[in-house]
Image (spheres, rainbow, N blue to C red):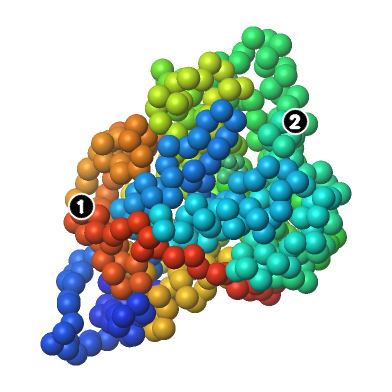
């Protein structure tokens, strides 16, 4: 069954070279053709994960996954394009940061990739570089309303200027939205009470910090006349604010992640709460249940994973929520975990899941229709998902850097990725990785279209 943007159809998918040549119907087979039989399976556009951090330096830690191990794991999870974040010190040139990140990724990636640029020092020349980065095929930046200690924080004035400038240059501003003062105040309070073990991570970054920052950013974006994209939202209240803004005609795009839809803060009660430390944190079960309803209602437009893979050994060095490496591996499990939790249970259609995993991220970041859709002329990036069978996910089933683990261990998974094709090449099939580092390419994004409907 072929999964299109608005429906499923039965029929053939014809690939010629790197592109899709025909979708649906019955195609005549030429003698030189190789044929894959996907009867009983879903044939979907390759997953686009718009939120990864490979080879990320974070304080004293560097993620275990680099561009090779990370994209190899991604291919096994049905992902054909990742979008990673540049990493650079304050006062760095954005153009240089892109060049450095590209030098790290080119030749190493097993799947296609694009980038977002982190901006944290707009006053010192970064604002002037923005048109150049759009020209370089990177029409999105990320700002942080928190992480002051890491030098990533931008204040409201800087963000407002950025939003205003972004409007006319086809740049999409993405935001990590947590009120910094609320987070730091809560952390200080817990520290005073001696409650700093990793188990308190969830409490240390309250849901209200996210809701307040989202509310403020929507207000600022409206005043600036710009779009805004929220990364990794965790709260139904923030999603509701975004929906209300969209209903007023404001382009507000919401991304959430599998971890916020399927895990809850009971993980912090277990013996290794540090393995579940990432930010924003996983929320209490009632919030998660309500976020799931928002997801089922189609109010979350994009799913990213925020993949940031540390090993178990790295995680176990943590003594408190202050010093734990933040992040989780997710790129390989996103499709099977979400398929199992929402499609196998018939709560979300395969069409809707595919839209948030492929077409919508492609539309938001200027990759559509080259990527994200099964359409004649599009890149032949395809995942074949076999819904039959069940298994329990184990750490050994992952293929990222050695020593990584999955926070979803023990979950029942329905079906499996049977094959992944990148631009017509089979890069994964039936348990075997067939790709190679360097086959992936940088894909340039087109400028953001303020009028684009991302449904
Ligand atoms: O804990 C996380 N999410 N680490 C990666 C950086 C970020 O905030 O996205
Ligand atoms: Zn973030
Ligand atoms: Zn992130």
Q: Residue at x 31, y 73 (%)?
A: 424
Ligand 2 under 8 Å from disc 2 Cβ:
no
Q: Nearer the viewer, residue 403 or 258?
A: 403
Residue 353 at x, y percent in the picture: 43, 60
Q: Is residue 377 left or right of residue 425?
A: right
- Dot in front, 2 or 1: 1
Which quarter of the figure is the C terminus placed in? bottom right
Q: Nearer the viewer, residue 194 or 453?
A: 194
Residue plotted at (70% across, 40% down): 152
Would you place residue 236 above or below residue 386 in this image?
above
In the image, ligand 1 is in what quadrant?
top right
Residue labelled with disc 1: 431
Q: Quadrant of residue 243?
A: bottom right
Label 2 to label 1: alpha-carbon separation: 46 Å
Residue at 58% x, 22% y: name it. Answer: 323
Q: Is residue 14 left or right of residue 145?
A: left
Secondary structure of residue under mark 2: helix
The x and y percentages for residue 451 are 68, 75
Q: In the image, is 119 to the left or to the right of 402?
A: right
Q: For the point 58% across and 53% down, which residue is it?
A: 100
Left or right of residue 90, residue 371 in this image: left
Q: Is 260 located above or below residue 163 in the figure?
A: above
The residue positioned farthest toward the left in the image shown: 31
Q: Which residue is mark 2?
A: 182
């Amino acid at each position: 069954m072929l999964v299109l943007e608005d429906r499923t159809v039965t029929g053939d998918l014809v690939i010629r070279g790197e592109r899709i040549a025909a979708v649906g119907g019955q195609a005549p087979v030429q003698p030189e053709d190789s044929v894959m039989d996907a009867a009983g399976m879903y044939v979907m556009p390759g997953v686009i994960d718009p939120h990864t951090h490979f080879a990320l330096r974070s304080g004293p830690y560097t993620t275990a996954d680099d561009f090779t191990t990370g994209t190899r794991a991604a291919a096994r999870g049905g992902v054909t394009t990742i979008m990673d974040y540049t990493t650079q010190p304050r006062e760095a040139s954005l153009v240089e940061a892109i060049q450095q990140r590209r030098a790290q990724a080119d030749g190493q990636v097993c799947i296609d990739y694009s980038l977002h640029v982190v901006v944290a020092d707009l006053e010192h020349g970064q604002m002037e570089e923005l048109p150049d980065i759009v020209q370089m095929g990177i029409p999105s930046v990320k700002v942080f309303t928190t992480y002051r200690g890491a030098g990533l924080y931008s204040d409201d004035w800087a963000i407002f200027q950025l939003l205003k400038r972004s409007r006319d240059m086809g740049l999409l501003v993405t935001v990590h939205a947590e009120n910094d003062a609320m987070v730091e105040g809560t952390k200080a309070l817990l520290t005073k009470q001696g409650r700093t073990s990793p188990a308190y991570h969830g409490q240390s970054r309250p849901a209200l910090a996210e809701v307040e920052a989202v509310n403020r950013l929507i207000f600022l974006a409206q005043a600036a006349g710009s779009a805004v994209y929220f990364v990794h939202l965790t709260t139904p209240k923030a999603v509701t604010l975004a929906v209300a803004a969209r209903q007023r005609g404001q382009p507000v795009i919401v991304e959430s992640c599998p971890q916020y839809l399927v895990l809850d803060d009971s993980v912090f009660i277990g013996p290794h709460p540090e393995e579940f430390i990432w930010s924003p944190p996983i929320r209490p079960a009632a919030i998660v249940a309500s976020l799931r309803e928002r997801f089922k209602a189609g109010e979350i437009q994009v799913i990213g994973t925020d993949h940031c893979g540390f090993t178990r050994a790295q995680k176990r060095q943590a003594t408190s929520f202050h010093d734990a490496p933040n992040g989780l591996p997710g790129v390989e499990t996103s499709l099977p975990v979400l398929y199992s939790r929402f499609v196998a249970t018939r709560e979300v259609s395969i069409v809707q899941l595919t839209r948030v995993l492929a077409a919508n991220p492609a539309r938001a970041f200027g990759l559509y229709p080259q990527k994200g859709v099964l359409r004649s002329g599009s890149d032949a990036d395809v995942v074949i998902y076999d819904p039959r069978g069940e298994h329990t996910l184990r750490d050994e089933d992952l293929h990222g850097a050695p020593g990584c683990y999955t926070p979803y261990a023990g979950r029942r998974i329905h079906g499996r990725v049977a094959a992944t094709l990148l631009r017509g090449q089979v890069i994964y099939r039936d348990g075997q990785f067939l790709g190679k580092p360097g086959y992936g390419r940088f894909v340039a994004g087109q400028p953001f279209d303020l009028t684009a409907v991302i449904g």
